[in-house]
Image: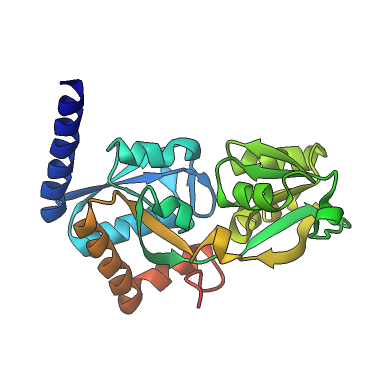
Amino acid sequence: MKKLLVAGAMMAALATGAVQAQDWKTVRFGIEGAYPPFSWTDESGQLQGFDVDMANALCEQMQVQCQLVAQDWDGIIPALLARKYDAIIAAMSITEERKRTVDFTGKYALVPNKFAARKGAELDLSKDGLAGKRIGVQIATTHDKYLTDNFGREVSLVRYGTADEAYLDLKAGRIDYVFLDATAIEEGLLNKEGGDAFEFVGPSVTDEQWFGEGFGIAVRKQDQKLKEMLNQAILDLRESGKYQEINGKYFEYDVYGG
């Protein structure tokens, strides 16, 4: 009996999602709010950044009401599946592993991944070169998985809830490097006070196996109508020039990539 009740609840949830998918009047976006320039939370508690402006522009293009929901990174996909919001726009890389759980739009941005360290440091991106090094990453990200899969036994990974926590430890000398996407490091470390003491080191890392095809907007698998609406809206924003207008507020290059 219990199994039948569970199955019935699942069918009802899917049916509800199907109804919503046909008539979207409001779209709720989950946004991290701690990963500048894509998103951050200002002194008044308001979400700001590229992802925030994109979410609002997408809603305007789709002619729906827009709601923004702040969500810590480590719970961002579970909260989507629990219907806390309808889509995630949070500099999330499209990867095969994540596709097992959620669906993605096409990319809306593509950013290389870099290491940063105090000036004068060198980086040899090999198992021998990273042996004994302490590298700061944001927990449960593609950066974390890439290093774990490739160098986990050779390096000491220090995992943080936010990128800002990693920058503080790098400045304090408690870690040797941080590994994040390049624009986040520029905005959160290099362009801040005291950032001139640090620099990018080593090569850009873009392995598609770990970092996917770029950043996509995640939706629940049953919400295909919403995915189609978002995909069309991304294309429309690029065609109209609105995407480039938002891009120019935060980046000195086309963050959409080739």
Q: In this orientation, does residue 182 appear? A: yes
Q: Who's the residue at 56% across and 62% down the image?
A: 209
> Is 70 situated above or below 141?
above
Please identify the quadrant where the N terminus is shown.
top left
Image x and y of residue 79, in percent: 36, 36
72 to the left or right of 141: left
Image x and y of residue 36, in percent: 54, 51
Please identify the quarter of the rendering in which residue 171 is found: top right
The residue lying toward the viewer, choosing from 245 and 134, is: 134
Image x and y of residue 124, in percent: 83, 60
71 to the left or right of 21: right
The residue lying toward the viewer, choosing from 70 and 101, is: 101
Q: How is the image coloured?
A: rainbow
Q: Who's the residue at 40% across and 42% down the image?
A: 77
Q: Who's the residue at 19% across and 36% down the image?
A: 10
Image x and y of residue 117, in percent: 79, 52
The residue lying toward the viewer, choosing from 81 and 91, is: 81
Please identify the quarter of the rendering in which residue 241 is found: bottom left
Q: Who's the residue at 35% across and 71% down the image?
A: 242
